Amino acid sequence: MKKKALFIGGTGTISTAIVKRLAAGSEWDVWVLNRGSRSHVLPEGVHQITANINDEPVVLEKIRDMYFDTVCEFIGFTVEQVERDYRLFAGKCGQYMYTSSASAYHKPASSYIITEGTTLANPYWEYSRNKIACEEFLMKKYKEENFPVTIIRPSHTYDERNVPLGVHGKNGFWQVIKRMQEGKPVIIQGDGSSLWTLTWNSDFAIGYTGLMGNRHAIGEAFQITSDEVLTWDQIYQTIADNLGVKLNAYHVSTDFLRACGDRYGYDFTGSLLGDKSVSVVFDNAKLKRAVPDMQTNVRFDTGVKIALDYVLSHPEECQKEDPEFDAWCDRVIDVLEKAKSVI
């Protein structure tokens, strides 16, 4: 008899890969609960429950007679949202998997090598603090009421529709790619030497699905990342190499980017100081003990080639221009160049 999984969301960068992996197998009966706006990305055989998860009475009615071996939460960002999930699924699931974030780890941690035991604390990013609060609520329910929670902490995970970057505008990565193509200087935070980890979404799915229905995962937290470690200069250089262009890297301190960018709504305090400017190397030994099949198969040079091929062949979907950010980059670089000539 198949086990039954429910995905809250199910059509995002990470969850789509997991749903596809499960749907291709024979072990799981896969359900998704969302508004139905991206149903076209779901593989054949996936069952859809169309509802707004925040409309609790409607959701409760739709799942009233259902029991799920695993409930997978991907869009829970606040304590209020996981409290809602607890009310909906307590007693109705054998496992509740909450997607937190590796940005919840202390910034900077006492060691750049990160394990699940690294302290959770991020004074720079409200997003991360909310994730920490969600984890604390869920683990309290596990300890006091045996609510069967598993915490998942992804780091920077991407797919064919996303090119990972450190500094970009409100419309995402495309304007930076365009600057590379035009030979313009591209801003990289710091001196480009801090360490970072990027994970292809189908590789992430290997670890995640191995934790589903896994008795060793209940009451535990797991980070799921690639073992490949790159500097930010290497990341940008790999992108430029795949584009066949020369990288004109322009290094700007994180503090300067915060001072110049936060007032334009770029939140570099959170996304850089609270995340990407800090060197991290993830120790995935705990995950590999629980999921012996865990391995990552897609190196960044391969993954980013797949992503760029898709982005360049799908202009309407992926190429969102951002002239405001483009002009902002030019102003930042111009100011710094003028400062060099004055001193």
Image (spheres, grey):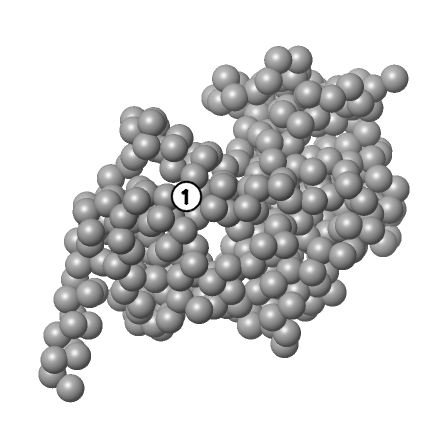
Number of numbered discs on residues: 1
Q: Is residue 183 above or below residue 41?
A: below
Q: Nearer the viewer, residue 9 or 175?
A: 175
**Which residue is farthest top?**
45
Q: Between residues 265 and 163, which one lies in front from this camera angle?
A: 163
What's the residue at 20%, 65% (across, down)? 333
From the top left corner, tell me how far across and down residue 110 is, in percent. 63, 76
Question: The C terminus is located in which quarter?
Answer: bottom left
Q: Is residue 101 above or below residue 24?
A: below
Amino acid carrying label 1: it is: Val
Viewer-proximal residue among 98 and 146? 98
Q: Tag 1, which secondary structure?
A: loop
Q: Position of residue 161 (x, y in %)?
A: 43, 34
- Tell me residue 97's x, y (percent): 72, 41
Q: Quadrant location of residue 63?
A: top right
Looking at the image, residue 12 sits to the left or right of residue 244; the answer is: right
Direction from residue 294 to residue 54 in the image, left or right: left
Locate residue 81, reporting x and y percent. Answer: 62, 42
Q: Looking at the image, can residue 229 be seen?
A: yes
- Neighbours of disc 1 within 10 Å: few (<14), some (14-19), many (20+): many
Name the residue at 27% across, 48% down: 245
The residue furthest bottom is 343
Q: For the point 24% across and 45% down, which residue is it?
A: 181
Mark 1 — residue? 163
Q: Would you place residue 198 above or below residue 70 in this image?
A: below
In which quadrant will I find the N terminus? top right
Return the residue nearer the eye: 128 or 294: 294
Image position of 218 (left or right of 317): right
Q: In this image, 245 relative to 22: left or right?
A: left
